[in-house]
Image (cartoon, helix red, strand yellow):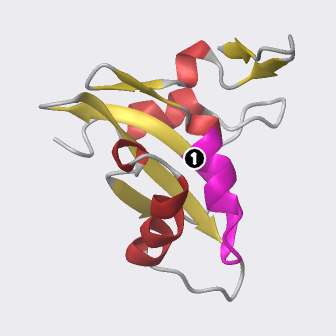
């Protein structure tokens, strides 16, 4: 997915399969991931859409903390909230020791979606 501004500049915002559609609105997983890793305690982050009974999908943030760092769910959500629309704020934060990667080193979102598919149900 991409946008073209009035000056003709193209900005790629996310991959179609990674965009989260929540209540008819689009949420960029990449933008949320970039915000999360901007926190001093976050080493790596992934955002996936998981099934939700009312909104179809909602974002969930999966985080690896930096060694020796401490950050809570509430701290991360408070860090993200002023930087995005309220409906973009993830419904939950899951802390893990590591995030799975593909053979090419990309975050394996397919595996994460399978693992956490029913997390909010």
Tag 1, which secondary structure?
helix
The answer to if 59 sits in the magenta stretch is no
Above or below, 81 against 50 in this view is below
* Residue at the spot 64% in from the left edge and 55% down from the top edge: 35
Q: Of 68 and 93, which appears nearest the observer?
A: 93
Q: Residue 13: percent from the left, percent from the top?
A: 68, 26
Res. 99 in view? no
Image check: 22 left or right of 5?
Answer: left
Q: Which residue appears farthest toward the front when viewing the image? A: 6
45 over 9 or under it: above or below: below
Does the image show residue 102?
yes
The quarter of the displayed image where residue 3 is located? top right
Q: Position of residue 84 (x, y in %)?
A: 50, 50
Image coords of residue 103 (percent x, y): 80, 30
All told, the count of numbered labels is 1
Check the picture and name the quadrant holding the C terminus.
top left
Residue 59 location in percent, x, y? 40, 41
Q: Residue at x 46, y 77 (%)?
A: 75
Crowd tier of the residue under label 1, counting other residues whose Cα lies within 10 Å: few below 14, some 14–19, many 20 or above? many
Asked whether, in this view, residue 88 is left or right of residue 15, the answer is left
Residues 112 and 26: in front is 26
Task: Say which residue appears at 34% left-offset and 57% top-offset.
Answer: 92
- Horizontal side of 100 relative to 11 (left or right) equals left
Query: Where are the magenta residues, as a range?
Result: 31-46
Q: Which residue is mark 1?
A: 32
**What is the quadrant of residue 45 in the picture?**
bottom right
- Quarter of the image for the N terminus: give it: top right
Was residue 34 drawn as part of the magenta stretch in this picture?
Answer: yes
Q: Nearer the viewer, residue 56 or 112?
A: 56
């Amino acid at each position: 997915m991409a946008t073209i501004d009035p000056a003709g500049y193209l900005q790629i915002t996310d991959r179609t399969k990674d965009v989260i559609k929540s209540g008819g609105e689009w949420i960029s997983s990449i933008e949320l991931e970039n915000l999360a890793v901007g926190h001093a305690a976050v080493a790596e982050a992934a955002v996936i859409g998981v099934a939700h009974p009312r909104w179809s999908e909602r974002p969930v943030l999966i985080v690896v903390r930096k060694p020796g760092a401490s950050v809570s769910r509430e701290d991360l959500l408070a860090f993200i909230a002023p930087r995005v629309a309220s409906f973009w704020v993830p419904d939950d934060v899951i802390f893990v020791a590591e995030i799975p990667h593909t053979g090419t080193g990309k975050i394996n979102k397919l595996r994460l979606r399978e693992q956490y598919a029913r997390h909010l149900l």
